[in-house]
Image (cartoon, rainbow, N blue to C red):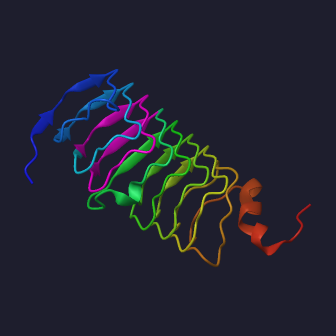
């Protein structure tokens, strides 16, 4: 399917809950303070784009391509990243609320999560090699058969990661965060 090509456009204060975003390949575009809640982005393509102060909660993203995308201060509750086109998927997040989102089965190594709320996010079987979770809240986030090798959790909080069910070779944790690696053993640390 050949999509129209849209390049270097900034979209501000748009509400895509009533009027759907045009199906296109968006390259180097910026979306500022736009509302996408419950909207369909299905089969769109976003390359080197930024989403700033946007609400992308519960969007439909089946087949969407995201390559080299920055999400800044976005509300993205229940975002189903696992339904996106996984080919060349490249994402970074700063000050975002990603609660209840899913990265199930994705290869998102080198992803940077900076000061994000990641409560109840599903990272099951996700490749997070060399990912960085800087000052992130990972309360009830699910890590099961995930590749966390070389991932940085030194400033993350509230995570629970089972060392025997995940690959954690060379991952970084703070001393205060070690309880998140031991909680499943029901031991007391004083």
- Classify the position of the N terminus by image quarter: bottom left
85 w.r.t. 8: above or below? below
Left or right of residue 190: residue 143: left
**Residue 90 x/y as whole percent:** 33, 52
Which residue is pictured at 48% across the width and 57% down the height?
Answer: 102
Left or right of residue 148: residue 72: left
- Classify the position of the C terminus by image quarter: bottom right
Label total for image: 0
- Please, which residue is most extreme toward the top here? 13
4 w.r.t. 30: above or below? below
**Residue 174 x/y as whole percent:** 70, 55
- Please, which residue is most extreme toward the right here? 190
Question: Over which residues does the magenta segment extend?
Answer: 46-72
**Residue 34 x/y as whole percent:** 36, 27
**Residue 161 x/y as whole percent:** 65, 66
57 or 119: nearer the viewer: 57
102 or 20: nearer the viewer: 20
Quadrant location of residue 117? Answer: top right
Left or right of residue 90: residue 78: right
Which residue is pictured at 50% across the width and 52% down the height?
Answer: 101
189 or 78: nearer the viewer: 78
Which residue is pictured at 48% across the width and 32% down the height?
Answer: 73
């Amino acid at each position: 399917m050949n999509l129209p090509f849209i390049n270097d456009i900034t979209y501000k204060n748009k509400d895509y809950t009533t009027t759907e975003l045009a199906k296109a390949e968006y390259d180097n575009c910026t979306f500022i303070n736009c509302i996408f809640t419950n909207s369909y982005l299905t089969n769109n393509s976003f390359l080197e784009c930024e989403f700033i102060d946007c609400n992308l909660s519960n969007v439909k993203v089946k087949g969407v391509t995201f390559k080299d995308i920055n999400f800044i201060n976005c509300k993205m509750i229940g975002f189903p990243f696992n339904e996106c086109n996984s080919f060349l998927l490249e994402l970074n997040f700063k000050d975002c609320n990603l609660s209840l989102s899913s990265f199930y089965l994705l290869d998102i190594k080198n992803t940077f999560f900076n000061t994000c709320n990641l409560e109840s996010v599903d990272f099951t079987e996700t490749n997070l090699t060399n990912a960085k979770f800087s000052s992130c809240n990972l309360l009830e986030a699910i890590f099961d058969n995930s590749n966390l090798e070389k991932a940085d959790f030194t400033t993350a909080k509230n995570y629970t990661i089972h060392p025997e069910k995940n690959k954690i070779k060379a991952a970084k944790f703070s001393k205060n965060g070690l309880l998140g690696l031991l909680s499943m053993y029901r031991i007391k640390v004083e």
